[in-house]
């Protein structure tokens, strides 16, 4: 009786997840799919998504790795507060993040006088897309990297030091390779989150083809404009990437 | 000659150490918790003493404001659990210190081949460190610590990770390998049986009481 209830509940939820995605894929006819992907706006969206997520990932790794290391190893006042701040974007609604970015970095935002003096405009540019992505996606990397650095064996770093390796080379040759599974997991998750970013982007960067219209935004615009085939083609592409990401993240966990 | 005269406040007591290690093997005997490992970490520069000096062949490694970081001390260290790099092969582990020193690839390979032969580990050169038995690991750790020709060697409980039967064999082996060295070797152990094997010179470390000048100190005997 209870077993049956568990089975039914489980089956219903799994079906609820699988059905829409399967429907999306089945909705696509190969020739129409390729045609829809070859339009200028679709190609722009693909290219922009690739460019911005790569930049966002690069920035996340460059700034997130030292932060994760400091959180894992450092003993400094306010470490727990910083730790909590890093996690914040994961729970803040993306639209709120977009509004917050706009109010600080926007044309009339808090930092507007400074940005204007420097001749920089951020909102409604490609840079804004990258900023929105870093904001929402970097915590996934920092969390994973922090975990990797926390669990790795400190004695191995000591061993490296006694063998004559300085701190930077020890980090590159011992610490990073040992934390590699965690780092790669964080990179994949963070990149996937940046790729799917919608709310903060549309608030802070707008929806301009070739400038700020990434794939999720193009899906939205195509659907609004009645181009169901275009929206579906981009959506299926995103689903395929997501599926690859899920498989990639789970693969090392199997052994 | 390795000369150590340092003090370090630990959680339960003040460790104060005063010892000279000439060339050859010196065993440092003491119960667990007496601060033996801390002594080695202070000498290697993995830990800063509160006061005092560490000198190796007349070179001040720590003392006053001077503090030479561990990677510039030229002191080999064999860790209790060997601390072999699990992501590297046996040969890469042994070559690690040579890489740090900046040896060319060819010279590195020759030296690693020689060492692995001397330690009877040639057949395992391409294996991962975590595929080895603990006796084999110990030999690799020793080969790695000696590869870059250190001016002193520290061993932290080199036999404690072994099962009792292997321990007897490895102890004899280790004794032979260490006897061939002409640098100061300081070996830390809690095992009385090691005293027999390494009785050339034995120091005792006993946990003392809290307080400056009244803490743990070394009592030298058997010299």
Image (cartoon, rainbow, N blue to C red):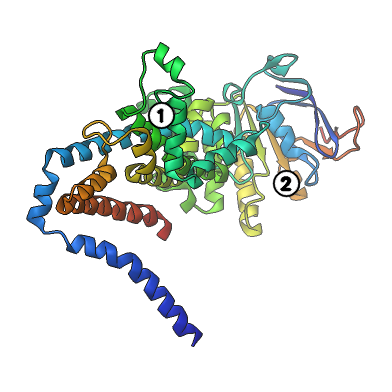
Q: Nearer the viewer, residue A90 or B54?
A: A90
Residue at horizontal 12 percent and vertical 48 percent from the top:
A36
Q: Is residue A134 above or below residue B31?
A: above
Residue linked to disc 1: B108
SS state under label 2: helix
Q: Is residue A225 left or right of residue A200?
A: left
Counting from the top left corner in percent of width and height, residue B85 is at 49, 42
Q: Are marks 2 and 1 in contact (CB under 8 Å)?
A: no
Counting from the top left corner in percent of width and height, residue B35 is at 78, 38
Residue at horizontal 86 percent and vertical 40 percent from the top:
B207
Report the quarter where the N terminus of chain B lies.
top right
Quadrant position of residue A79: top right
Per the model, the C-alpha gap separating discs 2 and 1 is 33 Å
How many numbered tags mark residues here? 2
Counting from the top left corner in percent of width and height, residue A215 is at 25, 43
User: What mark, if any, has residue B194 been given in the picture?
Assistant: 2
Residue at horizontal 45 percent and vertical 15 percent from the top:
A113
Quadrant position of residue A197: top left
Dot 2: chain letter: B
Mark nearer the N terminus (2 vs 1): 1
Dot 1: chain letter: B
Q: Nearer the viewer, residue A139 or A66?
A: A139
Q: Nearer the viewer, residue A207 or B77?
A: A207
Estimate how packed mark 2 is, as few (under 14), some (14 to 19) or many (20 or more) residues with alpha carbons within 10 Å: many
Q: Nearer the viewer, residue B222 or A179?
A: A179
Q: Is residue B150 left or right of residue A212?
A: right
SS state under label 1: helix
């Amino acid at each position: 009786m209870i077993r049956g209830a568990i089975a039914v509940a489980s089956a219903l939820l799994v079906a609820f997840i699988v059905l829409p995605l399967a429907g999306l894929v089945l909705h696509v006819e190969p020739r129409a799919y390729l045609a829809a992907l070859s339009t200028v706006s679709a190609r722009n969206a693909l290219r922009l998504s690739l460019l911005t997520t790569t930049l966002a990932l690069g920035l996340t790794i460059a700034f997130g790795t030292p932060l994760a290391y400091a959180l894992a190893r450092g003993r400094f006042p306010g470490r727990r507060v910083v730790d909590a701040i890093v996690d914040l974007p994961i729970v803040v609604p993306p639209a709120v993040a977009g509004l917050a970015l706009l109010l600080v970095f926007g044309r009339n935002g808090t930092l507007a006088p400074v940005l204007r003096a420097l001749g920089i405009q951020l909102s409604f540019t490609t840079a804004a897309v990258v900023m929105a992505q870093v904001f929402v996606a970097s915590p996934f990397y920092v969390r994973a990297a922090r975990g990797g650095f926390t669990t790795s064996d400190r004695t191995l770093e000591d061993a490296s030091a006694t063998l004559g390796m300085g701190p930077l080379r020890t980090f590159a040759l011992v610490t990073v390779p040992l934390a590699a599974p965690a780092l790669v997991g964080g990179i994949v998750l963070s990149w996937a989150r940046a790729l799917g970013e919608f709310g903060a982007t549309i608030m802070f960067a707008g929806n301009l083809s070739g400038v700020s219209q990434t794939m999720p935004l193009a899906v939205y615009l195509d659907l609004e404009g009645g181009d169901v085939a275009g929206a579906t083609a981009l959506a299926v592409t995103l689903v395929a990437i997501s599926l690859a990401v899920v498989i990639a993240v789970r693969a090392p966990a199997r052994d | 000659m390795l000369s150590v005269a340092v003090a370090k406040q630990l959680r339960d007591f003040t460790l104060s150490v005063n010892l000279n290690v000439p060339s050859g093997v010196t065993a440092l005997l003491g119960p667990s918790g007496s601060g033996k490992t801390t002594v080695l970490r202070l000498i290697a520069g993995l830990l800063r003493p509160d006061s005092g000096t560490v000198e190796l062949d007349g070179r001040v490694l720590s003392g006053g404001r001077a503090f030479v970081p561990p990677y510039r001390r030229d002191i080999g260290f064999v860790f209790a659990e060997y601390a072999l790099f699990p992501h590297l092969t046996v040969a890469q582990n042994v070559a690690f210190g040579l890489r740090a020193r900046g040896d060319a690839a060819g010279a590195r390979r020759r030296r690693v081949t020689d060492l692995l032969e001397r330690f009877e580990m040639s057949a395992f050169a391409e294996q991962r460190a975590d595929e080895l038995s603990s006796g084999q690991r110990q030999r690799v750790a020793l080969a790695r610590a000696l590869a870059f020709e250190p001016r002193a060697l520290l061993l932290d409980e080199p036999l404690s990770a072994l099962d009792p039967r292997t321990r007897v064999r490895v102890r004899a082996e280790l004794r032979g390998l260490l006897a061939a060295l002409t640098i100061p070797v300081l070996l830390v152990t809690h095992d009385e049986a090691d005293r027999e094997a390494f009785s050339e010179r034995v120091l005792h470390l006993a946990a003392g009481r809290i307080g400056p000048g009244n803490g743990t100190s070394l009592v030298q005997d058997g010299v």
